[in-house]
Image (spheres, rainbow, N blue to C red):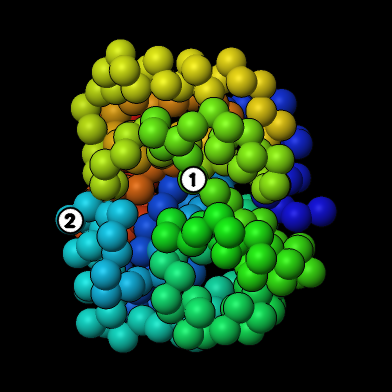
Amino acid sequence: MNKINSLFNNRGEQKLLSLYFCAGAPTLDGTADVILTMQRRGIAMVEVGIPFSDPMADGPVIQNAATRSLKNGMTLRLLFQQLTAVKDQVHIPIILMGYLNPIMQYGIEAFCQSCVESGVSGMIIPDLPFKDYQEVIKPVADRYDLRVIMLITPETSEERIRFIDDHTDGFIYMVSSAAITGAQKSFDEQKQEYFRRINQMNLHNPRMIGFGISNKQTLLSAQQNAAGAIIGSKFVTLLNEAQGNADKALDQLFEALEH
């Protein structure tokens, strides 16, 4: 069974925590160590960012990480090599998060094959049109038993959400706001209402809430209304400040989530 499905099927009442970081930042060779450290510290799932020169959905923190990664020399081919080297040690799901352009340049078939060879369970492609997902990406991903995770926002219509739910597998990524990524201190009533509204739709797929989670209030709000939370910008900032020391960054993250 795909590791993503297995994680959600076996979680029971546990609320999951997934973390995002950009491969190759702050150090070129740190990717594998960050993943293994996350696994050891109890993180349920990892999103590894593929650096791209024009990350439209990302705020300055993740944009800066991508720029640094590219300057360090990170490429998709190198990332797959790094992941393959630790494949047998990694038991939690790894999801690659990246924009369509680098993936298309690599080749969809080759990309999916490399995902399987390196232990990757799925992908998130923020700028992938749903029509292209259905006609081009999904048939190939299905052959390789990979999950393509789709995003929904407060602006996504109920009809569209149900359509996505019917045509995807794994989980649905609930973006907390239609804005770019970045840490927030709290989720206002409007966002809470959005979370509750989606909760009441009784979708087939579990949901994870991301964008803006950085403290206890935002974490609890996400956990109350979904299977768990995804943290990106906050962890990327801490990892950068810790100069790539993932244990130190996780210590500081867990401390921040207590307040």
Residue visible at 56% across and 20% down?
199
Residue drawn at point x = 62 percent, y = 26 percent: 14
Please, is residue 96 above or below residue 234 in the view? below
Viewer-proximal residue among 166 and 77 = 166
Mark 2 surroundings within 10 Å by alpha-carbon count, few (fewer than 14), some (14 through 19), many (20 or more): few
- Residue 222 image-quadrant placement: top left
173 versus 79 height, above or below: above
- What residue type is disc 1 on? Leu
| Image coords of residue 208 (percent x, y) | 52, 36
Quadrant assignment for the C terminus: top left
Q: Residue at x 17, y 56 (%)?
A: 60
The reply to whether the C-beta atoms of the residues labelled 1 and 2 are less than 8 Å apart is: no
- Which residue corresponds to mark 2? 60
Q: Amino acid at mark 2?
A: Pro
Image location (x, y in percent) of residue 149 = 58, 51
Q: Is residue 125 left or right of residue 131?
A: left
User: Would residue 181 appear left or right of 14 to someone viewing this image?
Assistant: left
Which residue is identified by label 1?
Answer: 151
In this view of the protein, can residue 97 be seen by the observer?
Answer: no
Give how far apart the Cα atoms at labels 1 and 2 are: 20 Å
Q: Which mark is residue 111?
A: none
Q: Nearer the viewer, residue 164 or 19?
A: 164
Which-is-in-front pick, marks 1 and 2? Answer: 1
Residue 116 vs residue 168, the one in the foreground:
168
Using a 10 Å C-alpha cutoff, classify the residue at mark 1 as few (fewer than 14 neighbours), some (14 to 19) or many (20 or more). many
Circle 2: element type: helix
Whole-percent x, y for residue 119 in the image: 66, 68
- Residue drawn at the location 48% of the way across and 85% of the way down: 105
Query: Which badge, 1 or 2, is on the more N-terminal residue?
Result: 2
Residue 225 in the image: state x and y as whole percent: 51, 20
